[in-house]
Amino acid sequence: MASRILSIGTAVPPTRVPQERIRDFFAAQPGTDRLTGRLIHAAFDAASIEHRHTVLTQLGDPDASPAGGTADSPGPSFIDGLALQSPSTRARNDVYTAVAPRLSADAARSALQDARMPASAITHVVTVSCTGFFAPGPDYRLVRDLGLSPDVERYHLGFIGCAAALPALRLATRITTAQPEAVVLVVCTELCSLHVRSSSDPQQIVAASVFADGAAAAVISADPAWEHLGGLELHRFATTLTSEGEKDMVWTIGDHGFEMILSAEVPRIIGREIRGAVGAFLAGDPAPDVWAVHPGGRSVLDRVESGLELPPHAIDASRKVLRDHGNMSSATILFILRALLGDREVAADSRISALAFGPGLTVESALLTKRAPAPA
C-alpha cells in the first residue's frame, strides 16, 4: 500500500471572535490616527474572514482571565481595558508553552479517534510550529500526554512558516515508504495571535487581519493493515523558491514577540510564478480534480485561482477554511485536507493538488488521491 493520510483531527481554542469585533478593537487603539484607522478597516474587511479563534481570551471577553496561567498565577495580560498591551517575547512564549501542548494533544486524539487507532500504534511523531519554542518540546509532550511508547521516534520542524505541513507530510511519507509497518503522527500547532501588536505599519496591519490559532494532526501509514480506512494517498512532493520575495515574507524574533513582515508583493509574486511552479510539479499529468491551497489571505487565493486559470469553485474548501478560521499558518492546509476528506461531493479516486507558501518565498506542493474506505 502506498503511504496514506488515514485520518485528520483538528482543534481550536474556545475563544471565537467575529472579524468585525477584532477590526473595531484595533481601530480603537490609543493613538490610532485617521489614516491608520482607514487602513485597518480596509485590510480587515478585505480578508474574507468571518471568525477567528484565539488563545487571547481577553479579546473575546475583556474580563476573562488571561490565557496561560492558573487561578493563583494568571498569565500575562494582553489587553488592559481597550488598549492592547505589549508583553515581552518571554511572556508570550510562556503562554505558548502552557497552551500549545493541550491543543496539540486535542488534535492528535481527534485524529486517532477518527482512525479508531490506539495510541500504542504510533511509531513516529513529527511536530510543526513557528510560533513558540520550548524544550523538551511539543514532540516530547505528545509522547507523555498521549501515553505513547517512550521508544517513539520524534522529529520537530520549526520556523518553516505557513508551508511547513507539506514538508512534514513529505517526511512522514519517506518514513512510511522505508518502513511500511510505521505509523506516523504529524501535528501542526500555531498560536499566531500571541504575537499580535498594535501598529500603524501596513504590513503589521495585514498580518493582524488574517492570522489565527489552531492545531491539526494527521495519521500516516503504508501498512496494508490500515488500508480499509481509505484516506488520502500521498504520491509525490515538490519544493521550489520563487525568483524574488526573500524580503517580502519574513518571520523574525523581536523583544515584544515574533515580528511578521507580509508585504503587498506576496500575492503578486505568487500570481506571477505559480503557473511555472505548478507546471513543473505536475509535469504534464492530467489536471487535478480538486485543489487545496493554503489561504495566506483572500488575495493569495485570488492570485492562485487566476494564475492557474482554475474553474469556479475549485478552491472552495480553502475559501471556507479562511472564512471560518482565518490563517492558522502551518495547520491551515490540514484543515482544508480534512474538509476534502469528509466531503461526499469529492469522489473516491479524485486527484488533489495541495499548495502552501512560506518565507523565501517557498512554494510547497503535494499530489494526493482520495481513497474510499472499505465497505463495512
Image: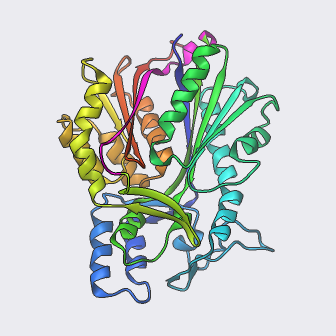
Which of 38/128 is in front? Answer: 128
Quadrant in which residue 116 is drawn: top right
User: Where on the picture, by quarter, is residue 13?
Assistant: bottom right
Give coordinates of residue 100: x percent, y percent: 65, 53
Residue 222 appears in view: no
Q: Residue placed at 38% from the left, 65% from the top?
A: 209
Q: Position of residue 171 (x, y in %)?
A: 56, 28
In the image, is residue 233 part of the stretch drawn in magenta? yes
- Residue 250 appears at what percent x and percent y? 43, 57
Q: Would you say residue 40 sits in the magenta stretch?
A: no
Q: Left or right of 335: which side holds 46?
A: left
- From what the image shows, is residue 33 above or below residue 181? below
| Residue at position x 30%, y 23% in the image | 282
Question: Depth check: 208 or 290 in front?
Answer: 208
Could you tell whether 325 is left or right of 277 in the image? right
- Please give the name of the residue rendered at 37% of the width and 47% of the height, measured from the top-left corner: 361
Q: Is residue 191 above or below residue 270?
A: below
- Point 75% across, 51% down: residue: 135
Q: Which residues are magenta?
A: 224-245
